[in-house]
Image (cartoon, rainbow, N blue to C red):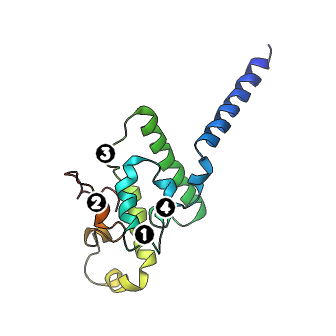
């Protein structure tokens, strides 16, 4: 049995992957430039809100939305990329991206990490800490300027 068809198939697959990665500027998604996050129209209002919000000078998208440890950060980026590419290819792009529970937990951990001195009394207090930071600080990361006009704007989309 000849291995030529298998070799041709593997080479063709590699060529398609390399061309696809080049055409989509794949490496931009490995960094932390907010412009890369805004490549999809679904992110327009979120990006606009961040750009005009208080965190623009202090944090990028990845500072809040990915873990800070190297391996977990790129695992989250890979999962997000998979979901975004799948939605795009299947034509199932939502009007608003719904954050998964794991995403909400990452953002919460990053809020606490960056604002540890400020929230120390809350974290060690006697009151239960059973809410997300953005339940009260709704526009902290994304100013209201980018808030959606859709009726579901006040549900947990992206904090």
If you read the primary sequence from the N terminus, does the residue marked by circle 2 or circle 3 appear first? 3
Give SS at disc 4. loop
Instruction: Report which quarter residue 130 is drawn in.
Output: bottom left
If you read the primary sequence from the N terminus, does the residue marked by circle 4 or circle 2 appear first? 4
x and y percentages locating residue 109 in the rendered image:
42, 69
Q: Which mark is residue 109?
A: 1
Give SS at disc 3. loop
If you read the primary sequence from the N terminus, does the residue marked by circle 3 or circle 1 appear first? 3
**Residue nearest the observer in this picture, 96 or 145:** 145
Instruction: Report which quarter residue 115 is drawn in.
Output: bottom left
Label 4 to label 2: alpha-carbon separation: 22 Å
Left-right relation of 1 to 109: right
Let me know if residue 18 appears in the view: yes
Q: Which mark is residue 147?
A: 2
Q: Which residue is mark 3?
A: 95
Quick check: marks 4 and 2 in contact, CB under 8 Å? Answer: no
Label 4 to label 1: alpha-carbon separation: 10 Å
If you read the primary sequence from the N terminus, does the residue marked by circle 4 or circle 1 appear first? 4
Q: Nearer the viewer, mark 3 or mark 1?
A: 3
Label 3 to label 4: alpha-carbon separation: 22 Å
82 vs 120: above or below: above
Label 2 to label 3: alpha-carbon separation: 13 Å
């Amino acid at each position: 049995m000849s291995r030529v068809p298998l070799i041709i198939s593997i080479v063709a697959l590699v060529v398609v992957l390399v061309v696809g990665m080049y055409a989509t500027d794949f490496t931009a998604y490995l960094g932390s430039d907010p412009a890369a996050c805004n490549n999809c129209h679904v992110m327009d209002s979120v990006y606009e809100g961040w750009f005009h919000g208080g965190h623009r000078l202090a944090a990028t998208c990845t500072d809040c939305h990915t873990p800070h440890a190297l391996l977990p950060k790129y695992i989250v980026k890979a999962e997000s990329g998979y979901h975004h590419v799948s939605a795009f290819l299947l034509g199932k792009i939502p009007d608003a991206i719904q954050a998964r529970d794991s995403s909400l937990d990452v953002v919460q951990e990053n809020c606490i990490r960056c604002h540890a001195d400020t929230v120390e009394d809350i974290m060690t207090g006697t009151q239960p800490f059973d809410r997300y930071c953005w339940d009260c600080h709704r526009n902290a990361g994304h100013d209201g300027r980018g808030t959606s006009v859709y009726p579901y704007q006040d549900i947990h989309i992206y904090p």
